[in-house]
Amino acid sequence: MLTQETLIKRYREVYPKDTFQTISNKTNIQITRVFRIFNGAEMKLKEYLLISELLQTSIDSNEFVEKAKICLQSLSIHKVEAILNQMNHSLKLASFKSKYSANSFNNSLQA
Amino acid sequence: MNFNITLPERMILESLQQSSKTLKEINECTKLDPLFLKNIVPSLVSKNLICTCQNNKYGFNKNINADIKSELKNHTSLKSELSEIVSSSIRDRLDNSNQEAFKLKKVFLTPREQKIFKGLLYNVETFLESAESKEHNTSDETIFFWGENNYGKVTHNILNY
């Protein structure tokens, strides 16, 4: 497990151009809180996990976007549609996970 | 409306086709994480695919119209769903070394051998079709998938898709 300092430093290495607003948009952490975190304020566990998750993505988001543009130009329309459908499908599956607490729902299952 | 049905949603629909269930019973039948159920079930209700019944139960909507039935078999959505099933099995084979999860063989068969294979396959298919319907948890079902295609044709299709 990285220290908070190392995590922030690594984030800056991987995403050097990210503004505090961008980080806030990616993590849903309030921008003022992002500013404080990146200036030494102690992170909550949830914030640490959110930022760690961004670093775990092995695909550079810029590469992803560039590849998508090349696919649009180079692949058949059917292939592009198939990729888009797969992305929509994956997004839908991901949307089923929400920030809703499983614990409170477990309580409702007891009823 | 394109429902773009996913496998977890279809699992819940199949579970409720057996019988109406409370959320807890759906959880026990499908073993789906309560976190997912909390998001998926209202979504299915809003699409009129399932309905709320007495005693806090949910039931499969048997009165869905022909258009909605056809949407559930939408080819675009089915391709994504089936790809997910196969991809998951391939990951299980390659990442988790589960030898039974996915098998693939390329082989040349003479016409006589093809006839023998078709006979054996017919027996397997008949056996699966005749498996008696027993009360069970949806999550305990086994997914089998099979098919065959000519190697050259597959390669050609991949290159020209």
Image: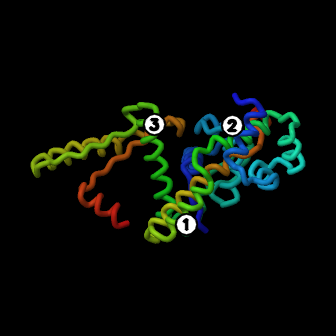
Amino acid type indicated by mark 2? Lys
- Three-letter amino acid code at the position of disc 3: Asp
- Label 3: few (<14), some (14–19) or many (≥20) C-alpha neighbours in 10 Å: some
Cα distance in 3D space between marks 1 and 2: 45 Å
Pick the residue in front: B22 or A106. A106
Which one is closest to the eye, mark 3 or mark 2?
Answer: 3
Q: Residue at x 15, y 45 (%)?
A: B116
| Quadrant of the rendered image containing residue B90 | top left
How far apart in space, not on screen, are marks 3 and 1 (Cα)?
A: 31 Å
- On residue B92, the disc is 3
Indicate the secondary structure of the residue bearing disc 2. Answer: helix
Q: Is residue A41 left or right of residue A18?
A: right
Q: Which residue is mark 1?
A: A69
In primary-sequence order, the first of circles 3 and 2 is: 2
Q: Which mark is residue B33?
A: none
Q: Chain of mark 3?
A: B
Classed neighbour count for the residue bearing mark 2: other residues with Cα under 10 Å, few (<14), some (14–19), many (≥20): some
Q: Please provide percent x and percent y for residue A48.
A: 77, 36
Of residues B50 and A18, the one nearer the viewer is A18
Given residues B31 and A100, the one toward you in this image is: A100
Q: Residue at x 67, y 48 (%)?
A: A96
